Every structure is written in structure tokens, then in C-alpha cells.
Amino acid sequence: MPYFDAASSVPLHPVARQALTAALDEGWADPSRLHREGRRARMLLDAARETAAEAVGCRPDELVFTPSGTAALHTGIAGVLAGRRRAGRGLAVSAVEHSAVLHAAAAHEEGGGSVTEVPVDRTGRVSASAYEAALRDGTADGGTALACLQSANHETGTVQPVAEVAGVCAEAGVPLLVDAAQSLAWGRPEEGWSVLTGSAHKWGGPPGVGLLAVRKGVRFAAPPPSDERERGRSPGFENIPAVVAAAASLRAVRAEADAVAARLRPLIERVRAEVPRSVPDVEVVGDPVHRLPHVVTFSCLYVDGEALLHVLDRADFSVSSGSSCTSSTLTPSHVLRAMGVLSEGNIRLSLPPVPGESVEADVERFLQVLPDAVREVREQVNAPGTTAERSTAGQDGRARDEGPEDRAAPYGEQSAPAPEEGGRELTVNALGTVCPMPVIELARHFDDVPVGGVIVVLADDEAARVDIPAWCEMRGQEFLGVQGDRFRVRRLS
Amino acid sequence: MPYFDAASSVPLHPVARQALTAALDEGWADPSRLHREGRRARMLLDAARETAAEAVGCRPDELVFTPSGTAALHTGIAGVLAGRRRAGRGLAVSAVEHSAVLHAAAAHEEGGGSVTEVPVDRTGRVSASAYEAALRDGTADGGTALACLQSANHETGTVQPVAEVAGVCAEAGVPLLVDAAQSLAWGRPEEGWSVLTGSAHKWGGPPGVGLLAVRKGVRFAAPPPSDERERGRSPGFENIPAVVAAAASLRAVRAEADAVAARLRPLIERVRAEVPRSVPDVEVVGDPVHRLPHVVTFSCLYVDGEALLHVLDRADFSVSSGSSCTSSTLTPSHVLRAMGVLSEGNIRLSLPPVPGESVEADVERFLQVLPDAVREVREQVNAPGTTAERSTAGQDGRARDEGPEDRAAPYGEQSAPAPEEGGRELTVNALGTVCPMPVIELARHFDDVPVGGVIVVLADDEAARVDIPAWCEMRGQEFLGVQGDRFRVRRLS
């Protein structure tokens, strides 16, 4: 039963379990009490803080424990924005941050602040110069109070140039919050951060523990209401057993990190190389060099990601698709959208960082299973290039009854002369259909347009905005733009 | 090693431990994922919600899990205040609520809202008519959006008339939030609440779990930033193992509750009766009838609470003093202050609600140890009535060097004629001394004033504001009031 969704959550590390069990016996009392049970709890809490601070690379009194990585991000962002209110109300975040950062940014905007989104390249990487420009933009709004950057992306594994961005921030006198949730297991964050956050269940610690480190000297005003626990930065009774388990497992995971990375990285490289060879119309996304050792993500044209997840689940593979934080919605991942890459049929493999003999064999079996799984899902929707499409095009019941081809106009029928092209346009109606149907309709009718001609796809599915341009990029065709629900593509070859 | 601080936190219930261990294996994955690990986690979460909802007395979709009871209170209060903003900006809270409620109220005031504090009687109990008056006050500010009342007090064990107050609130159309942290272990809350909160580590569940139930129909807007987890009311990765353990242990604790209460209640009654017999100058506080079965609180005149804690700790008793939320500060408990009872030398015994053979014997031994412990602490400060005071009054080194008696003016020396008394006043200078010294100075010099005369105590210790009036009440003397640092007391007998 291979579990390849480690970037979402991993099973408890054996060291975490051991520490948790012990701390449940010793650390259940209120650490602010003067009695022996309280003093024992306080000692465990202090020791856990020292261990975690050492792993993060900060002083113990700079670190507090929060109930989750999300809480650490929310408090970290709100705390600096409030503490540095006089410096300005600007907040700069990369376009591929975790949704917890984007939610905090949206709350800041609702409260009257301004947010600048820093773009990424097609591999999902930011540049120091883009942050420099964003900080300049912030000055126009009265100054940037805070910049945020993840250490590595949760969907693509792309590692960000934290130290370079930190340099730009330092020069501008703007503190940098680094969301290190995806990378803390692998090593100490790069230097230069002002605020750092993490989440224990990502490295094999228990759920219920986040880390929030704030460098001395950074103006910080925790959002009210607060209490006297955790330096006034994380209200509520301390979860000492979980905190002890989190700290102990972080140390243990770090000790194993290099060996685990050396084992997983070649497996990921193999997936990156092999999938495009064995599955047609696949785009492997994320930076090929600057990447986490255990994550690989690819998108498959003409595939419904959820359907592919189910087929892989039947074959015993647990993987994820799109952004974890939008899996209950129909909108495509904001990360893939920001990168400008295909979002349909998106699959992320994130290998568990625990020692185990079967990972290699499991990855090999995944590579064997994947081509048939993708073919099966494509055939369900009569995707271009499938046997189903070639032998029964136009005859498949579902496609005929509900598919858009009945509505697709024959070449030229509904089109009007397009003066700027000097030719006519083919319009394909995919309104009311969802991913991957609009792109399938585009592909299916593409050959009906002569080279140089234009095809118009009518589509109101949110994912089409990501996937039609991405299809053009993959196919070397020209995306002319979208107006309302009209996507225009020129055939170049 | 008797642990008598159950109202702060109790060790993990065996059922909680068992459930936690099992759920760590089964419930570590992200419940929003579609793969089998995610589905398994989702099932555990759903089952835990049903169990907890049954215990609370609400529908599963009315209940969310938060990272702590404090978080449940903060979100519950902010959520109703935001959701009912149009109804008004008034918030009514009893004067003896948990500090988490008072912190949320302070945040509401900072944000421009108004807060009405509902007074309590000398037993710490509110009345429905006092809430009725508070809701009327709120109307003057544009309407009360929310009223808050604890089910039972954490310091005194006093049980509040929740159903009566709920009736008054319903009549006024104001939702009532009930903080049930101290009583959920003992039974379902009384009917009539609109929002209900709880905290698992108070009933033997793990830390890291709070409950927030919001009745259908109550307008609620969770404070931003939020995410899609827990109905948008509690952001961050779900702590499923802890939630499962919390729900399972709540059910188990409830099944045992009547039997445990029947065993603990007579022990508490015995302490309430015996302590005033065996220790002079003690005030047992809290309602004698409407009370939790496991809590008893008393205050000892002329005693430094922290010093008494240490002596009892040496005798192996873990008890607490004052409010748990102010133990790191020097201010007296806001609960005792609101009740108008003595705060100095305050001790709370809260017996663990777990079956165990030694509680009876431990309580007996406590009753044997207590009189000597109090005497020892009183002798350290030369308190009135101690051997030390009788034999060495004015000669004790510490008192002579640092104590206020060198500064205490002889009768009349610093006093001016007090025309309204037609007599002279004795002024005792206790400035710069802390609890219990100002009250000791008052008592020590009290006999120097004739019946009908007035003694003035100069004191700048915060606790004197509670304890000098309380001393008068206990002694049947007349407290004339305080102006600045001048406390005036008339001798009646």
C-alpha cells in the first residue's frame, strides 16, 4: 500500500511516538503551576524549546509553539504587520505561497492593507529582483511592512532562493517571514530570515504543533486576544506531550536527512525522466535543479485529476492532485496557475522520508501502472489520441449526449470573419463543461483549422484559464488571449 | 504524591490513551485527501465529532474542534460579535469568567465595542436579574450582541444558573455563550445555550483539543483568516488523534461521572467543614450548595499563598492558589476580587475525577497537615495570633529590618482630626509591602484604636483592595472605604 503523499502529512516517526508516550505521563500538568507536576511539565517544555530552537537555528526565547503551522503563519504575519504598522501597510508574498499565507494576506487587504504578489517563473521559482521590485511597489503604498517567502513549494518541490531574497529585504529594511514547512525536515533554513514558521506533522511529528520563531529586534505585536502563555504569542494551554514529540522527532529526522535524501533523490529523478517517456502529453513541472529531494509533480493533458487519483487508488497508490488546500473546490491550484503550467491531470508524488525497503520497488511499480491508468482515464472522456476516440469518435454515448461536440459548430458555421487575421475562425462551444473537457474540445477540433487559422473555445470552467494557455505552450501553438469566456488560439503548425 | 489540582489539568484518562495510540496509527493523514489514508482519517474525525456532539447535546454539524478551550472561547466570542454586528456592539460577561473570556472582552473593547460586567454575589454566583439588567444596559449602547456565562467557576467550583440566564437571554433575543470547561466531565450542559465551549484536558482528554458548538441559526462569522477546515471556524491541519482521544474519553468520563461525584462530594464537604474548625481565621469561599463535586477553595488570613503552596508541596500535596491565569503575576485573582472575599492565603483543592483508592486517605492526611502548614507560614511573617508574634513581637529580624512596623506611626502621630468621626485616627504605614503584610499590620495595630475609632492603613499592594475589606467582613468591623492608598476602617468591637 504505497503512500506517496508525504508532503501532506506523514505517519508519526518512531521517535515522536516514544517521546509522546513518555511525555503523556510526565507533561500533562499546567506548566505555570508551582507544584511538582507543573514544574515537571515546565522542564519538558523548556527542553523541547531548546531542541527545536537548535534545529531551527535560533535562540530558545525567540521560538514559540503554536497549535499548527497555519496558526504560526497567521500569527507571524499579523504580528509583524501590527508591530510595524508605522513602517507601512504593504505586504509582499510570492504567488505560490501556501494558502494559509494567502488567506492571511486576504485578511490584511480586507483590513485596509495592501498586498503585492511576487510572480514566479515557469518552474515556480521567484527571483530576488522580483522581490526588489515588489518592495519598491510597497513604498508607493507608504512602505512594505513584511515580505513572505516559502523555503520550498508544497506542490512542486521547487526550492526558493531564500538567502538572496533575504539580502534584498535586508537592504530595504523589510523583515522576511520564511514558511519552512516543507523543508525543515531536510535541514536548517538558509540564513537571513526575520520570522520563521514550521509544522511538525510534515516531518513526522504529531499534529497540533507549529513553530513560530521571531528574531530579537523584529517589532512584533501578536493579534489579540492573547494570554501570558508562549510569550503572549500563542494563547491556550500548552500541548506539551505533542511539543516534546515534535522537537525530539525533528532532531531524529535531521540526523537521518542526508541519507534519506540520497536515497529518494534518484527515485524522483527517475520519475521525472521516465513519466514523459511512457505517458504521452505529460508536463513535468517544478524546477529541475532547485528542488526538494522527495517531491515530483506532473500534469497529464486530457485527464481529470480526480479520476486519475481514483484509478491509482484502486492500484493501491496514495498520491495527491493539485493544491491540498483546494481539493474540496473545483478551482485549479493557484500554484500551477501562477507558474503558467498545465493543471489538469495533476499528480504529485511525495515520498515518505522514513527508512523503508519498499520505496524503490513501489516507485518502479508506479511507473509500470501509470501509463495504463492515464490511458484508462483518457478513454473515459474520449480524449484525443485514445483508442476510444479513434474508433468511436462521435459515437460514445456520454460524449454524444452531454459532450459539447453536438454544439461544436462545423468549421466556419458560427464564425464571423476575423479582419485582423484576414481569415475565418472556428468556434467550439465548451460552455458548461469542466476540466479536462474544454482542452479536449480544443484539441479534437484543432486539425479542422488550417495553419494560420484561429480556433475560438467558449469555456466557463475556471481551469480553462490555466490549461488552454498551457496546452498552447506545450503544443507550440499561439495563445491569442481570452475575453470573457472566449479563448482564441492560432494554429502555427 | 496526592495531586489535588484537577481543575487545572488531569492526567490522560486510560481510554484517551488507548484511543490516542490507535488513532496515531490510523488518523495521521490529511482528511481532505481522497486516498485511503485520507478517507480513514476523515472517518475517524466524523466519528469523533458524532461522539462529542452526543455528549454536548448538539448536532454533529454544529460542533467543531479547536486547538484549545481558549481558542474555542476566542473564536466563539469573536464569531458571534462579528456575525451579529448589526444587532449591536455590546458584550455582557460575568465578572468571574475565565481569563480567556475577559481577554476576548478586552480585545472587543479595544476594537470599539462595549463590555458590561455582570456582578456576582459573595458565593460567586450570578443572578438572572443581573443579566437582565446588563442586557438592558447593552441596549443603551445600540444593543447587546452576545452574553457569556461559565457553567461553573474554575476557582471556587460555584455552579451558575445557566438555564435561568439562558431564559433571560432568549427573552431579550441575545445569544448566550456557555463556557462549560469545568463541567463537561460531569454531565450535559443545561439547555438554552447558543454557543458552547469546552477543553479536553480538563476531563482527562489530551491537550490540544477544544470544543466549539454553535447552534444552527446563530449568526456567526469566524474571525479571519480562516480556511476550509472545520467549517471555516478553526484553521489549520486537524489534530485527529487528539480529537479521537478527546471524544472517547469524554464518553468514558461521563459514564463514570455519577459514581465519581458520589465519592468526591462527601470528601469536599468534609474539607469545607473541617478546615474552619482546625485552622483559625479561614474563609471557605464559593457557593455551599450549587457547586462542582470536586472543588473546594478557602483563604487564610495573614498568609502568603505562594509560601503556603511551597510548604504543602514539601508535604507532597499539589494544590493551586488564586487564579491559574494570574499565577505569574502579583495581582489577586479577579474571581475572588469580584466576590469580595479574602484572596490572601488562597488554596484550591480540586480532586482528580479518576477512580483511585487513595483519595480518601490523601484528603484525611491533607486535613492533618494543613493546620501546621498554615501556622508555619504565619509565623514566618509574625502574623497576629502566632507564637512568634506573641513572644517576639517587634523583635523578629525580618519584620524589624524590612517590615512596616518601624514605619507604623504610634496612635495619632500622623493623623489629623477626622471631623466626621469626632475623634482621632491611627495611621499605619504599609506602603511598599505586599500581601499579606498590609492586613497583618492592620490586625496588629487594631487593638490600639478604641472602639468607635478609626484606623488608616497606607498600602499600595493591589491585593489590599480585596483583603482589607474582606478582613473587615470576616471580623465584623466597618470598612469605610479607600481613597488612593488610604484604607479607612472603623473599630466596631
Image: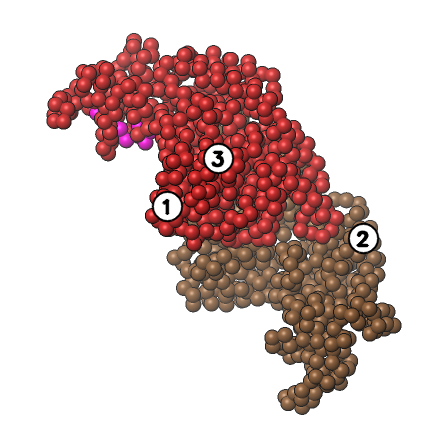
Chain colours: A brown, B red
| Magenta-highlighted residues | B456-464
Give me the disc on residue A314.
Answer: 2
State the residue in front, B67 or A97.
B67
Q: Quadrant of residue B25?
A: top right
Q: Quadrant of the C terminus of chain B?
A: top left
Give me the disc on residue A79.
Answer: none
Q: Which residue is identified by label 3?
A: B163
Name which residue type carries label 1.
Answer: Gly
Residue A229: image x %, image y %? 48, 38
Cα separation between marks 1 and 3? 21 Å
Give the residue drawn at x 44%, y 22%.
Answer: B288
Is B460 magenta? The answer is yes
Relative placement, left or right, of A176 versus A301 is left
Name which residue type carries label 3.
Answer: Ala
Cα separation between marks 3 and 2? 53 Å
Give the residue drawn at x 70%, y 44%.
Answer: B43
Q: Is residue B293 above or below residue B384?
A: below
Labels 3 and 2 positioned on one and the same chain: no
Q: Is residue B222 above or below residue B280?
A: below
